[in-house]
Image (cartoon, grey):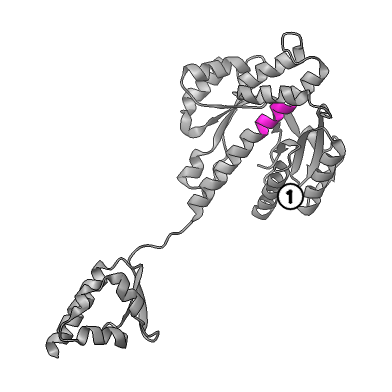
Amino acid sequence: MSTSSSSIRAFGAVLQRISPLKSHSLSSSSLHWNCKIWRTFSSSSLRGSQLLPHDLSRQCDYPSASVRTIWTSSPLCMGRRSSKIATRKGAQDLKKAKLYAKIGKEVVSAVKKGVPNPASNTALAAVFEKAKELDVPKEIVERNIKKASEKGQEAFIEKVYEVYGYGGVGFVVEVSTDKVNRSVAAVREVVRDCGGKMADSGSVVFRFKRARVVNVKISDADKDQLLGIALDAGAEDVIEPPDNEDDSEEDQAERYYKIVCSAGNYSSILLKLRDEGISFEPDNGYELLPVSPIEADDEAMELNKELMSKLLELDDVDAVYTDQK
């Protein structure tokens, strides 16, 4: 009997090391075996060696008392880093989708004003040049030229709505829509649900200035090199991104320099950046930059971010600008 018990303990030790099961249940002193397994290994022939580990798992029934679980592999966790990566990618995809949608609406409106031929339609030709400058795929333009000729398709109208957020922060919401009543109702609903307030025309927009902006990720360019390029090309300013000590290295790398310039030297700055091999993101024709950014508390910042996110989810909304720092 002692030989049989020793064999059982030895087999249990080997099983603990080689079993592919996710976890094994062990007592503090020895393995607890079900009577069926006990009879299998206590037989004189010791035929238990013919059983595979997964067969054992189906036949074992460990007692729940004084049992601890030993994990043989680390559990999969989705932490802050993976969540932020997904958030960044989602924001980038949304930004690109908004750009394509805006150009598409401009194509439809330009065709409605004339003919679907840029050689005879100066408005459409201007949109073609803008789309080329912003790296908008050709099929986006062609698709919306066809859309403009569809029955019932109306020209898009541009509207601007002004909103008060939390902590004195203001928002400017730019909309292109073929149904004004639909767009204003959707914007009002989001603002109300997020605790904001619609503002009178002119009460917020004066806080911003319109400018052409080239966005360059800080990980794609040296600061001094970028300043030199901007200065040589006649840029008005280079705005450095705010530094948040709580951000990880990946988040820090996702921040952008903003090269602010006039419409006249915008193309020359893009050309110089291409010559230097520096990646950049163009604007959608211009950006609204806050004249005096407002610093809100943490709670207000989070609420304002939610408001902006919900507004950008609306199909008719092309862009949302805020003076939150």
In the picture, the quarter occupied by the C terminus is: top right
Please give the name of the residue rendered at 78% of the width and 53% of the height, measured from the top-left corner. Answer: 193
Depth check, front residue: 143 or 120: 143
Please give the name of the residue rendered at 71% of the width and 14% of the height, measured from the top-left corner. Answer: 125
Q: Position of residue 64 (x, y in %)?
A: 40, 84
Q: Position of residue 242 (x, y in %)?
A: 57, 40
Q: Is residue 249 left or right of residue 18?
A: right
Amino acid marked by disc 1: Gly
**Badge 1 density bin: few <14, some 14–19, many ≥20, Cα 10 Å:** some
Q: Is residue 110 above or below residue 196?
A: above
Q: Magenta segment, which residues?
A: 98-105
In the picture, the quarter occupied by the N terminus is: bottom left
Number of numbered discs:
1
Note whether residue 93 is visible. yes
Q: Which residue is mark 1?
A: 167
Please give the name of the residue rendered at 36% of the width and 67% of the height, measured from the top-left corner. Answer: 22
Q: Is residue 54 above or below residue 65?
A: above
Depth check, front residue: 314 or 47: 47
Task: Tell me which corner region of the image, top left, top right, bottom left or bottom right, holds residue 114.
Answer: top right
**Residue that lies at the very extreme toward the top in this rendered image:** 119
- The magenta stretch spans residue 212: no
Please give the name of the residue rendered at 77% of the width and 48% of the height, measured from the top-left corner. Answer: 190
Tag 1 secondary structure: loop
Note whether residue 210 is visible. no
Query: Would you say the magenta stretch is mainly helix, strand or loop?
Result: helix
Depth check, front residue: 201 or 193: 193
Q: Position of residue 296 (x, y in %)?
A: 68, 48
**Residue that lies at the very extreme toward the left in this rendered image:** 3
